[in-house]
Image: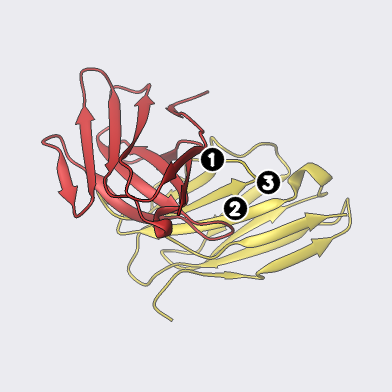
Chain colours: A red, B yellow
Amino acid sequence: RKEVEQDPGPFNVPEGATVAFNCTYSNSASQSFFWYRQDCRKEPKLLMSVYSSGNEDGRFTAQLNRASQYISLLIRDSKLSDSATYLCVVNQAGTALIFGKGTTLSVSS
Amino acid sequence: GAGVSQSPSNKVTEKGKDVELRCDPISGHTALYWYRQRLGQGLEFLIYFQGNSAPDKSGLPSDRFSAERTGESVSTLTIQRTQQEDSAVYLCASSLGHQAAEAFFGQGTRLTVV
């Protein structure tokens, strides 16, 4: 079952570029949404939670569209250090976190 | 330590042998998750523990896989009669248990079945 779907990429962008990742989820009962980041051969770490009103953290902006069951992540002014895999994650109350397969970003100088 | 601890960090085992992987969650975290990540692939949900509730075992791929958790502390994932397709990184995570809680991951156990 593909509960959370992401474009796997890779996205290859130059430093300073703006890049957007999309994610769709199948379960309309999902209640919490997150973006995690995973560096090569490392464990995933929370990048940001996604709120219905949209939220921003520095160069990162997350949006949620419940009607379309769609989540996005926008990265502005990309840095070399942003190179990683970005994981879309959804959760319902009382159930496990469900991870998308991730979108790979490579930022080059 | 303050983080999620997993042991061993690496395990090489012969096909057919049983293995046991351990996870020590962050103290006070009621939720504990096990995931499997094959090389170059995404995280595959295995099992979820939340407090004293019955665990969600819906992700376990076969009856060779089982997991236990003692109260709100240590968890062990056991794989019996290992197969080569079991080779992967097994990741454990814990959280405070409410739906918006951040999950903190351990560094994983890299299992290689030869």
Q: Chain of mark 1?
A: B
Tell me the residue that label 1 is attached to: B57
Q: Is residue A8 above or below residue A26?
A: below
Q: Are marks 1 and 2 in contact (CB under 8 Å)?
A: yes
Q: Residues within 10 Å of mark 3 (few under 14, many from 20)?
A: many
Tell me the residue that label 2 is attached to: B67
Tell me the residue that label 3 is attached to: B65
Q: Is residue A28 left or right of residue B104?
A: left
The residue lying at 75 percent from left, 60 percent from top is: B19
Is disc 1 placed on a helix, strand or loop?
loop
Q: Chain of mark 3?
A: B
Q: Residue B78 location in percent, x, y?
A: 68, 55
User: Where is the C terminus of chain A found, in terms of image quarters?
Assistant: bottom left
Is disc 2 placed on a helix, strand or loop?
strand
| Residue B51 makes an appearance in the image | no
Q: What is the three-letter code of the residue carrying label 3? A: Phe
Residue situated in front as seen by the camera: A15 or A105: A15
**Cα separation between marks 3 and 1:** 10 Å
Q: What is the three-letter code of the residue carrying label 2? A: Ala
**Cα separation between marks 3 and 2:** 7 Å
Q: Is residue B62 left or right of residue B57?
A: right
Q: Residues within 10 Å of mark 2 (few under 14, many from 20)?
A: many
| Residue B10 makes an appearance in the image | yes
Q: Chain of mark 2?
A: B
Q: Is residue B71 left or right of residue A35?
A: right
